[in-house]
Image: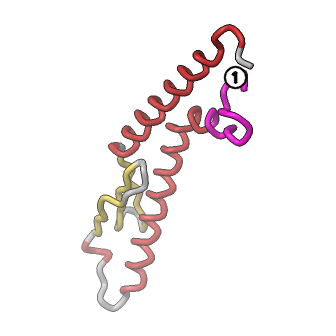
């Protein structure tokens, strides 16, 4: 079924891909992206793996008479930062995800 030691080579490729994936995931967890809303009145920071790390609110954005606008700005900043984190993850994991994405019929590796 795997003539000439192809199975060993395949296993080595799979192990290398797994190591690369783990490295990329660790790098994403350490990476941070920040996005803002309302012209910078509210900003949110999210890690590359999607964890919300912080929110900054400019005092000018705080109006006790208009809490809804502040809530909307916070939501917009968090959503924008989350989208940026998803793009970062897609860029970082892209080649690995493409290789692993074909796992429905095999391992997504050449020769399978």
- In front here: 91 or 22? 22
Instruction: Let me know if residue 110 is in the magenta part.
Output: yes
Q: Point out the stretch of residues depicted in magenta.
A: 98-112
Residue lying farthest to the bottom in this orientation: 65
Q: Tell me where residue 6 sits by quadrant.
A: top right
Query: Residue 88 location, x and y as percent?
Result: 48, 44
Image quadrant in which you'd find residue 26: top left
Query: With 20 as the anchor, is 8 left or right in this view?
Result: right
- Residue 82, compared with residue 22, is above or below; it is below
Where residue 70 appears, as percent x and y from the top left, is 38, 78
Pick the front one: 24 or 34: 24
Taking the spot 67% from the left edge, 39% from the top edge, the residue there is 103
Give the residue displayed 35% in from the left and 67% down from the top: 42
Image quadrant occupied by the N terminus: top right
Secondary structure type for disc 1: loop
Q: Position of residue 55 (x, y in %)?
A: 31, 65
Q: Residue 38, located in which quarter of the rendered image? A: bottom left
Residue 61 place in picture, x, y as percent: 32, 75
Residue that extends furthest to the front in the rendered view of this protein = 1
Q: Which residue is mark 1?
A: 110
Q: Residue furthest top?
A: 4
Q: State the count of labels.
A: 1
Pick whichever, 4 or 33, lies toward us: 4
Which residue is depicted at the point 33% across and 91% down? 65
31 lies above or below 34: above
Q: Left or right: where does residue 100 sit relative to residue 25?
A: right
Question: Magenta part mainly helix, strand or loop?
Answer: loop
């Amino acid at each position: 079924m795997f003539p000439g030691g192809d199975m060993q080579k395949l296993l080595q490729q799979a192990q290398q891909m797994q190591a690369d994936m783990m490295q990329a995931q660790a790098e994403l967890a350490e990476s941070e992206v920040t996005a803002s809303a309302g012209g910078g009145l509210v900003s949110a920071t999210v890690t590359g793996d999607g964890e919300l790390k912080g929110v900054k609110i400019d005092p000018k954005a705080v109006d006790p008479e208009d809490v809804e606008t502040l809530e909307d700005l916070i939501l917009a900043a968090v959503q924008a930062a989350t989208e940026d984190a998803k793009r970062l993850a897609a860029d970082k994991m892209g080649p690995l995800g493409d290789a692993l994405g074909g796992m429905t019929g095999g391992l997504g590796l050449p020769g399978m």
